[in-house]
Amino acid sequence: MRSENDFMMRAVLKDHAVRLAFGSFKELASAGIIAHDTDPVAGRLLAGGLVAGSLMSVLLNEEERYSIRIDYKGPAKGILLDVSGRGEVRGFIRNPHVMTEADSMENACGAGATVTATKSENGKILNSGQAESAFITPASALSYFLSVSDQVETEIRSEILLQPDPAAPVRCACAVMIQALPDCDLEFFNRMRDQLLSETAGKILNDPMLLADRKLETLTMLLCKTALPPAMDIAGVPAPRFVCNCSTEKIWQTARTMLGKEDFEKLLQENPDPVIRCQFCNKVHHYKADK
């Protein structure tokens, strides 16, 4: 946990029946921002979505996936995320250059957000849900979704700092998720939630002088209001990575299915060398009519 590389872990606070996920996601967030060439406002929103989605991956087994859509009424339009239980994360924001229309996150998102999430396994839908949220940040909107739709009291806090470096646009992306387990005292959990949303918790997550293990200890002591780190069962999980499984063959087959045989052949007649760009990773796929 002392490495500067991205990492994530999950734990159970044994004395309080609270699930916790914690990690650093600087490389993941940077990869998403670079792939989509976002401006600072769009980049902060996309990074927030990738980070919060990564924390939710601890709720999946290796073969399960979350497909998450956060829709906004403002010019940002929305964020789409795809998260696997193996730590593979990809996503995009529908308006990567939102600052041409809005100079702040609040103006970019508008009033509230609609979160839609589907859990699947090997292509089979396991469950899905939707929730209207007054919150606009991805962390808060997804916290509300899990609390309302999944009926599991949840709070996610992410702290993301950007920097003017095209090769490494994210200086810090640290985040934590807490969830109440069945035997949890909800009054205690709500006090933990208040502490997690406090200014002090934000300073801990943003502190560049604290190594990851010390940051976790300090944060959990704050959440539980103890002088010593609380007892935890800790398990390591794969470090989330920005991975897109798109391929020319897959996109070719999808285009055939979506357009239908007649429209697809018409497309090839008009343009024998069509190009399709993957929305998730921005990779361009070239096609040949004689494939």
Image (spheres, rainbow, N blue to C red):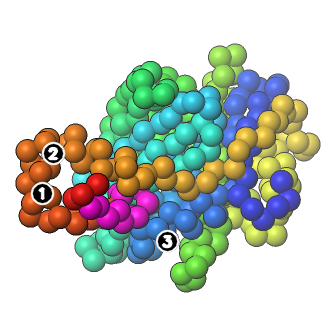
Q: Secondary structure at mark 3?
A: helix
The reply to whether dot 1 and dot 3 touch (C-beta < 8 Å) is: no
The reply to whether dot 2 and dot 1 touch (C-beta < 8 Å) is: yes
Q: Which residue does the numbered mark 2 point to in the structure image?
A: 259
Q: Quadrant of the C terminus?
A: bottom left
Q: Secondary structure at mark 1?
A: helix
Residue at the extreme top:
183
Question: Mark 3 or mark 1, which is nearer the start of the sequence?
Answer: 3
Task: Measure the alpha-carbon separation of dots 2 and 1.
Answer: 9 Å
Marks 1, 3: nearer the viewer: 1
Q: Position of residue 49 (x, y in %)?
A: 48, 52
Q: Amino acid at mark 3?
A: Ile
| Of 186 and 258, the residue lying toward us | 258
Q: Residue 266 vs residue 164: left or right?
A: left
Q: Secondary structure at mark 2?
A: helix
Q: Residue 289 vs residue 17: left or right?
A: left
| Mark 2 nearby-residue class (10 Å; few <14, some 14–19, many ≥20) | few
Question: Mark 2 or mark 3, which is nearer the start of the sequence?
Answer: 3
Marks 2, 1: nearer the viewer: 1
At x 51% / y 42%, what residue is drawn? Answer: 83
Q: Is residue 222 visible?
A: no
Q: Which label number is shown at residue 34?
A: 3
Marks 3, 2: nearer the viewer: 2
Tell me where the magenta segment starts and ends, as one range: 278-288
Q: Which residue does the numbered mark 1 point to in the structure image?
A: 267
Placement of 107 over or under 88, stated as above or below:
below
